[in-house]
């Protein structure tokens, strides 16, 4: 296993979740909105406020213009390119996005455009990867495109269930792209996922149900996962 320090990326669907993530010790977040829809593009105002308040925080911004599949029209791609440029200007540290073809392959032309709009920032291909027709072929495509990392559960319902496939992806990646293990990551399984897959990065919402019934990031859960992986 790599000697790199384990990294927890906390998925935050609101400003309040992001603030709790930082309170819990998170150094990197994936910022989005509408987690109940599996995440949509957050507001520029949220990005800017977090950047101003936490200059050192690594803010990976999800760019996803709507719920549903990842096959985008030309108009939607233009919206995504514009949103990426706005996120970069507002202080994003990295961009999280992705696009597929109707046949379930990486849409290379679209992804190339999204990477270009990111102005050289690191680029994460999100969990659209988990619905591609062939992950081995798809991973090589992402490597060829120069993608920095891919967020995946190995195609399983959770990262824990996908450990065997995640391990294969880490071996195939061979350091050329980061495999960011996500999906059901929590204080009880984060350490095992890192150890058994060989990756050094995990992604989770570290959430808990609040008294008002909303489910948001919990500072205590962030602390617990960090403690587990840094043990």
Image (cartoon, rainbow, N blue to C red):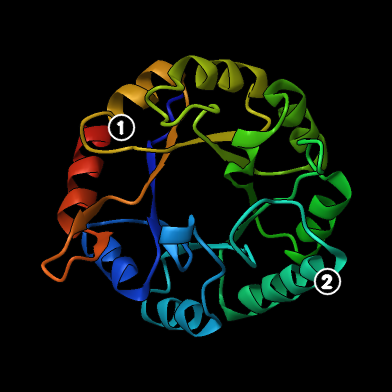
Closer to the camera in the image, 220 or 98: 98
Quadrant assignment, res 93:
bottom right
229 up-or-down from 115: above or below: above
Residue 5 x/y as whole percent:
38, 36
Quadrant for the C terminus in the image? top left
Residue 144 x/y as whole percent:
82, 35
Quadrant assignment, res 132:
top right
Closer to the camera in the image, 213 or 15: 213
**Image mark count:** 2
Residue 150 x/y as whole percent:
60, 39
Q: Is residue 163 left or right of residue 122?
A: left
The Cα–Cα distance between marks 2 and 1, rounded to whole angstroms, is 39 Å
Q: Residue 190 carries which label?
A: 1
Q: In this view, does 125 lie to the left or right of 104?
A: left
Closer to the camera in the image, 173 or 32: 32
Q: Do the residues labelled 2 and 1 touch (CB within 8 Å)?
A: no
Question: Tag 2, which secondary structure?
Answer: helix
Label located before the other in sequence (2 or 1): 2
128 up-or-down from 32: above or below: above
Q: Write the residue at 46% across / 22% down.
A: 162
Q: Write the residue at 60% across / 21% down.
A: 169
Residue 12 x/y as whole percent:
38, 61
Q: Residue 75 carries which label?
A: 2
Q: Write the residue at 55% across / 81% down.
A: 44
Quadrant for the N terminus in the image? top left
Question: Tag 1, which secondary structure?
Answer: helix
Residue 129 visible to an observer of this rendering: yes
Residue 1 visible to an observer of this rendering: no
Q: Nearer the viewer, mark 2 or mark 1?
A: 2
Q: Write the residue at 34% across / 51% down.
A: 205
Quadrant assignment, res 176:
top right
Q: Alpha-carbon neighbours of circle 1 within 10 Å: few (<14), some, or many (≥20)?
A: many
């Amino acid at each position: 296993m790599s000697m790199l320090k384990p990294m927890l990326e906390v998925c935050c669907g609101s400003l309040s979740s992001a603030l709790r993530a930082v309170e819990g010790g998170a150094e990197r977040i994936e910022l989005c909105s509408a987690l109940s829809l599996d995440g949509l593009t957050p507001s520029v105002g949220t990005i800017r406020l977090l950047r101003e308040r936490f200059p050192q925080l690594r803010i990976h911004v999800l760019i996803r213009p709507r719920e549903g599949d990842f096959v985008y029209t030309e108009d939607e791609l233009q919206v995504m390119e514009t949103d990426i440029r706005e996120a970069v200007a507002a202080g994003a540290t990295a961009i999280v996005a992705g696009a597929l073809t109707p046949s379930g392959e990486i849409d290379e032309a679209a992804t190339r455009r999204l990477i270009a709009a990111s102005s050289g920032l690191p680029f994460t291909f999100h969990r659209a990867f988990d619905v591609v027709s062939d992950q081995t072929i798809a991973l090589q495509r992402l490597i060829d495109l120069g993608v920095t990392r891919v967020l995946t559960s190995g195609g399983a319902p959770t990262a824990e269930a996908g450990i065997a496939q995640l391990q294969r992806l880490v071996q195939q990646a061979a350091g050329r792209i980061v495999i960011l293990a996500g999906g059901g990551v929590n204080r009880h399984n984060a350490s095992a996922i890192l150890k058994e897959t060989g990756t050094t990065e995990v992604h989770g919402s570290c959430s808990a149900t609040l008294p008002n019934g909303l489910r948001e990031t919990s500072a205590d859960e962030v602390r617990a996962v960090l403690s587990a992986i840094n043990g």
